């Protein structure tokens, strides 16, 4: 990217920063709200790190394997987890009016 031109590099970096900010801002708040206050930091850290390891780690290999079948299948692995994330967001309930003491049951309805 940088070899093509500095302008392209700045535009790409800016777009990435905007997309990352838009996606991570609600993620941090939502993961924190899922856990009760006595284990909030541990639960937040564990869920974020395990998610990155077990889903983000094999993502390039899964995409490469699917892409070797057909180039159209490259984004399938990502799309599957986007649909799972949208389902989890849909099933989550708002915790705005819930007190911190009432949060021991968690916020995701199954």
Image: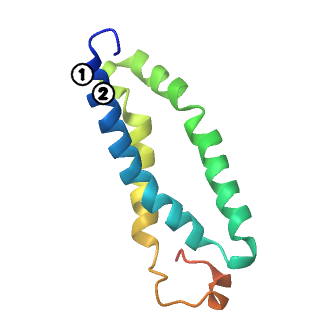
Q: Secondary structure at mark 1?
A: helix
For residue 80, above or below residue 104: above
Residue 99 x %, y %: 58, 91
Give the number of the disc on residue 10: 2
Q: Secondary structure at mark 2?
A: helix
Residue at 52%, 32% in the rendered image:
59
Residue 96 x %, y %: 46, 84
Q: Which residue is mark 1?
A: 7
Residue, far front: 6
* Cα distance between the residues tagged 1 and 2: 5 Å
Within-10-Å neighbours for mark 1: few <14, some 14–19, many 20+:
few
> In which image quadrant can residue 33 be found?
bottom right
Residue 73 x %, y %: 35, 27
Between 43 and 25, the one nearer to me in the picture: 25
For residue 40, above or below residue 3: below
Residue 55 x %, y %: 57, 41
Within-10-Å neighbours for mark 2: few <14, some 14–19, many 20+:
few
């Amino acid at each position: 990217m940088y070899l093509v031109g500095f302008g392209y590099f700045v535009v790409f970096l800016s777009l990435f920063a905007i997309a990352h900010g838009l996606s991570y801002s609600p993620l941090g708040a939502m993961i924190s709200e899922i856990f009760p206050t006595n284990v909030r930091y541990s639960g937040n850290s564990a869920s974020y790190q395990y998610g990155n390891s077990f889903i983000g780690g094999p993502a390039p290999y899964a995409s490469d394997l699917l892409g070797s079948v057909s180039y159209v299948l490259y984004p399938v692995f990502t799309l599957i987890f986007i649909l799972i994330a949208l389902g989890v967001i849909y099933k989550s309930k708002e915790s705005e009016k819930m007190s911190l003491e009432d949060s021991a049951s968690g916020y995701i309805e199954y």
